[in-house]
Image (cartoon, helix red, strand yellow):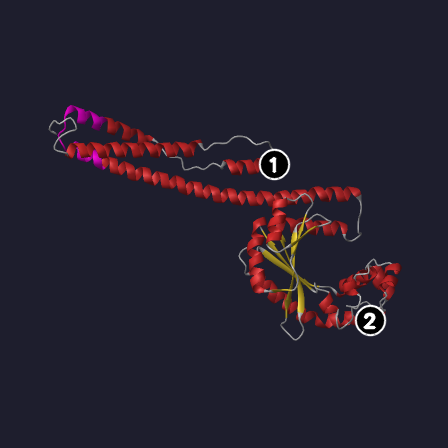
Amino acid sequence: MVIDNLDLFLSKNRISKLAWEQSNLSWEELKAIGSEHESRIPNLEATASLLANTVQRNDAVHSVRWRVKDTGHLLAKIVRKRAEGNEKYANISIGTYDAIVTDLIGIRALHLFKSDFEVIHEVIKNLFLLEEDPVAYVRAGDDDQFSEQLRSMGYLVKPHPSGYRSIHYVIATQPLKKKIFVELQVRTIFEEGWSEIDHIVRYPNYSNDEMLIYLLTIFNRMAGSADEMGGFVKILAAEQTEVKERMLGVIKERDESLAKVDSLLAQLEGRKGDDSSNEKIKQLKKEVNKIKAVTAPVTTQMSAKSALNLLRLLGTPGEAFSWDKALSAIETQRKLDDIASRAAKNLVILKSPTSPDGSAAG
C-alpha cells in the first residue's frame, strides 16, 4: 500500500530530506507510480509463480524463491537512484518505470554444488530471452581460473562489495500486453544462508559496526569454504564409485581367469604325463590356490589428486599418497595372466606329438 504522507515515507525508508531534494521528484508523481505498481501486483505474482515453477523443473535446481517488489521498496529505490544521479532513472515516470526497474519480479534459484550453475546457465539461455549480459559476482580472492571460466561463458565478472558469489540474469517475458523484466539470481544454498543473515543483521540499521562486519566476513569465508568442500565431496564420491567399479571388474576378471586355469588343470590331469609334467601341474595348483586365497580389495581410497585438493582446501601441506590396495589388485591380475599363459603353453606341449626335446609325449 502506498503511504500518503511524504514525511512518513521518508522516515520509514530512512531517506534524508537532502536525498529527497536531490532526487528532484514530485511526491504526486511518485505516488502515481506506486498506485500503478499496486494495481499490477496480482498479474506480476502470477507471472512470477509461472517462471519460478519453470525454473524449478531443472534437476540442478534445489529450490526456488520468488517475490514481487514491495511498493514502498520500489519508490525508495527510485528516490535513491535519482539522488545518486543515476542516468537510467533520470526520466522515470508512470509510463516508463517498469522498463527501467528490472527487478519488479525477483526469482532466486538455489543449487547445492558450486558447479551446478553451468547446467542451470544452459537451461536459462535456452528458456528465456536475456535482456542484458549476465553478471557473475565474485568475492575478492576468488580463484582467477574460476573467473576466467565465467568470462568464457559470457558473464560479466564483478567483485561484490559485500563479498558474496551470485549470478544475476535480467530476463524478459510478455504473458500480457506489457513486457515484464525479471531479475533471476542463481547461487548456492550456502551463499544464500550467509547473504540472508548478513541482510537481516546489517540492513535494518545500515550497520557499519566494525565487529559485526568482521564476524560477517569470517562467516562469509566459511560459506565459501563450505561451497568448495561440497564440490570436493561430490567429486570424491564419484571417484570412489568409479574405483569400486574398477575393483569389482578386477575381481570378476580374476574369477574368470581362475575358472579358465581350473579348466586347463582338469584337462592336464586327464592326460598321463611324465614326472616333469606332473610336477608342473602341482606347481600350477599351488599357484592357483595362492591366488584364490587373495581377497581383492573392494574398499576405495581417495586418489592422490583428490587428497591434495582436500589438503589445499584445508591449508595443509601436501603429502605423498599411494593406492597400495589398487596396485596389489593389479599385481594379482598380472600373476593370474602369467599363470593362465603358462598353463596354456603346457596344454599345447602335452597335446603335441612330441615334446620340445624330441621325445614322445606321454
Q: Secondary structure at mark 2?
A: helix
Q: Amino acid at mark 2?
A: Glu
Q: Amino acid at mark 1?
A: Leu
Residue positioned 42% across, 34% down in the render: 326
Q: Which disc is residue 314 wearing?
A: 1
User: Which label's residue is closer to the chain start, 2 or 1?
Assistant: 2
Relative to 249, residue 29 above or below: below
Relative to 77, residue 345 above or below: above
Q: Residue 250 appears in which quarter of the rendering?
A: top left
Say which quadrant the C terminus sits in.
top left
Q: Which disc is residue 70 wearing?
A: none
Relative to 307, residue 139 above or below: below
Residue positioned 85% across, 69% down in the render: 27
**Residue 302: x %, y % from top left:** 49, 37
**Boundaries of the magenta span:** 263-282
Q: Which disc is residue 29 wearing?
A: 2
